[in-house]
Amino acid sequence: MLGVTGISNTDDLTAKDAFGNRRSFRLRPDGFVLAVTLEKIRVPRDMIARVEGRSTYARMGLSMHETAPWLQPGWDGPIILEIKNNGPLTIELTPVVDMPCQLTFFS
């Protein structure tokens, strides 16, 4: 994730800090955050894509992109993820290491 946005603040979360240590983001129970992917995606004009959560993370209560999961034909750029922690525990997400979502392409 490049950027993490809460209701009241924004943090640019790089994969590592100035000392080379991995950085993480903690999402508390019932927490919601917007995050930007490191990857940039280009959806061909004759296809559409859907952002979906992965089951490993869903079992912890993490949901991805519930309200706007579709990437329209011709989309080109990073994906803004809507991440919600529906579980009882704080979930720690680490850029590059954690990959909590996937794309499905349809033609």
Image: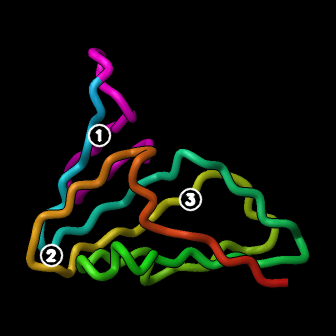
Quarter assignment of residue 47: bottom right
SS under mark 2: loop
Q: Which region is colored magenta?
A: 1-20
Residue 6: say if magenta: yes
SS under mark 3: strand
- Along the line of sight, the residue nearer the viewer: 59 or 10: 59
* Distance between the alpha carbons at the discs numbered 3 and 2: 22 Å
- Residue on which disc 1 sits: 11
Q: Which mark is residue 30?
A: 2
Look at the picture and state if 4 lies above or below 72. Answer: above
Look at the picture and state if 99 lies above or below 2. Answer: below
Say what amino acid the circle numbered 3 marks.
Ile
**Quick one: label 2 or label 1, which is nearer the N terminus?**
1
CB atoms of marks 3 and 2 within 8 Å? no
Q: Which mark is residue 79?
A: 3
Look at the picture and state if 41 lies above or below 102. Answer: above
Say what amino acid the circle numbered 1 marks.
Asp
* Residue 72 position within the rendered picture, expressed as x and y whole percent measured from the top left: 72, 74
- Residue in the image at 9% along x and 78% along y: 88
Mark 2 Cα shell of 10 Å, populated few (<14), some (14-19), many (≥20) = some
